[in-house]
Image (spheres, rainbow, N blue to C red):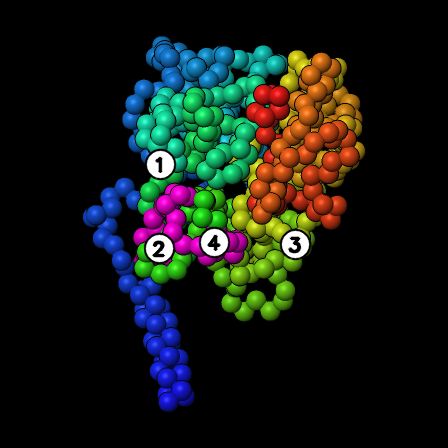
Amino acid sequence: MYFFISIRFMSSQILHKLLHCLGENEKNFKDVDHPNIVHLPVDDETHILSRQVFEGETCVERRDDENGHLIHSGHDHPLVLISNDTTTSLHDPMKRIKLLCNACSRPITNMPFYKCSTEDDDSCDFVLHDWCTELPRRLSNHAAHPQHDLFLFYAPYRPAGFKCHVCGLPCNGFLYDCRDCDNMIDVNCAFMPKEITHEAHTNHLLTRVDGASSSRSKMECHACRVSIAESETYFRCTTCDFYLDCRCALHLPKTIRHKYDKHSLKLSYSPIEDHKSQYFCEVCEEILDPRKWFYHCVECTQSIHSACAPLILKSEQGVNSLYLEGVYKYINIKFGGIEKEQCFHEHPLSLAPGTENDGLCQECGSKLQSHEIWKCLQCDFAIHWYHAYTIYFSANNPPSYVYIYEENKGMIKQRGPQKSLEFYPSEMTRPVTRHWEVVDDDDIEKV
């Protein structure tokens, strides 16, 4: 009897798997019922904001049709429309040209777009996608924060960024801010679609699940193979057990290019057929797990971690191997901002991703590689970005603690002097998704 029951149980499992596989080949939705659905991944690094239609009052104060200038409350200078200018270079990894939007931090790969109208030697690099000038000033009843209205905000005093409450990634672009409880959401997450389809799961509709509404306890992102917490925002298939966290779903383009390979590298969802050797990442030169999504060139048999892909353009040095997953943690940070007026160094400082050549922090002595840093443009001075706040307040009102975010450990309060604090284990020399530490500068400012 026991043997018979076991056989029946095994047969039911096999039947379930068979039906499950057959189900993936059948479409579980009708296109006519979802006319505005977003199909992912996008072809290049341009974000899905370009496919949105925004409603409501914008932050554009005035449009001057005579000279093409736009007055935007997020910038001090007029913005000029660039629509047909052969002298202006667009974002192009093949030529190592970087042009990122100040609102969404996504590359500007086509015209029209707006840029700062100043043309002197000290001109700023402020640019906006055409569609990012249409972002509404206020959002009501947002799924991530329905209890209060959210207002579009640009924080020039926060050049190193803030942590988005939805995706958890640091960002220094435009944000939607709650004036009652300081809940901050980057513009990419603010307009995250409710439904998507994805090439990795072609025929099934993927529906967004907003944190608190999650009812399952064990879920794993199909892209990075990391567990999804109940409080996270993610996409799920209602037909089968397929899940994508919001970062892997939205921030991994279909193809990438770089000057060291004449072919495009395509996002791959499984091991490449007839791949006879071990997988290695061409950027960090470390082993690559082909069960996780990665980029691959079939012609040249080159492979790259999905989290390493943005570093091709930045040419960041060094390696980290064991924990690379998902998306590059600074994908929503626009580096290059310059601080001329600050109290802790005599020369202008630039916000930059730390590299091996930057050495050690002159404030705490820890490695600068793979961190946001303030780097002097005239000398060898370089420090972690968060020390700018502790130095500023140390003269009269030194902060008694800072908050550090660590994966699987929540918020850890570090009291006392921070001189010997290391934010990455010594063996980790590369940025890693979901293993970063974020100092909450709001908490520092409130002390």
Disc number lying in front (1 or 3)? 1
Q: Amino acid at mark 1?
A: Ala
Q: CA distance from mark 1 to mark 4?
A: 21 Å
The alpha-carbon separation of the residues under discs 2 and 3 comes to 29 Å
Q: Identify the mark nearer the N-term, 3 or 4.
A: 4
Residues 339 and 80: in front is 339
The magenta span reads 201-228
Q: Is residue 311 above or below residue 379?
A: below
Depth check, mark 1 against mark 4: the one in front is 1
Earlier-in-chain disc, 2 versus 3: 2
Dot 1 surroundings within 10 Å: few (below 14), some, or many (20 or more)? few
Image: 421 above or below 218: above
Question: Which callout, 1 or 3, points at the residue further toward the start of the chain?
Answer: 1
* Disc 3 residue crowd, few under 14, some 14–19, many 20+, Cα 10 Å: few
Q: Quadrant of residue 429?
A: top right
Mark 2 or 4, nearer chain start: 4
**Residue corresponding to mark 2:** 237
| Residue assigned mark 4 | 221
Q: Position of residue 152 (x, y in %)?
A: 41, 23
- Amino acid carrying mark 4 in the image: Cys
Q: How many marks?
A: 4
Q: Is residue 80 visible?
A: yes
The first of marks 1 and 4 along the sequence is 1
> In the image, what residue type sits under mark 3?
Leu
Question: Taking the image as drawn, is residue 90 in sight?
Answer: no
The numbered disc on residue 322 is 3
Residue marked by disc 1: 143
- Left or right for 242, reference 323: left
SS of the residue under disc 4: loop
- Distance from the alpha carbon under mark 2 to that under mark 1: 19 Å
Q: Secondary structure at mark 2?
A: strand
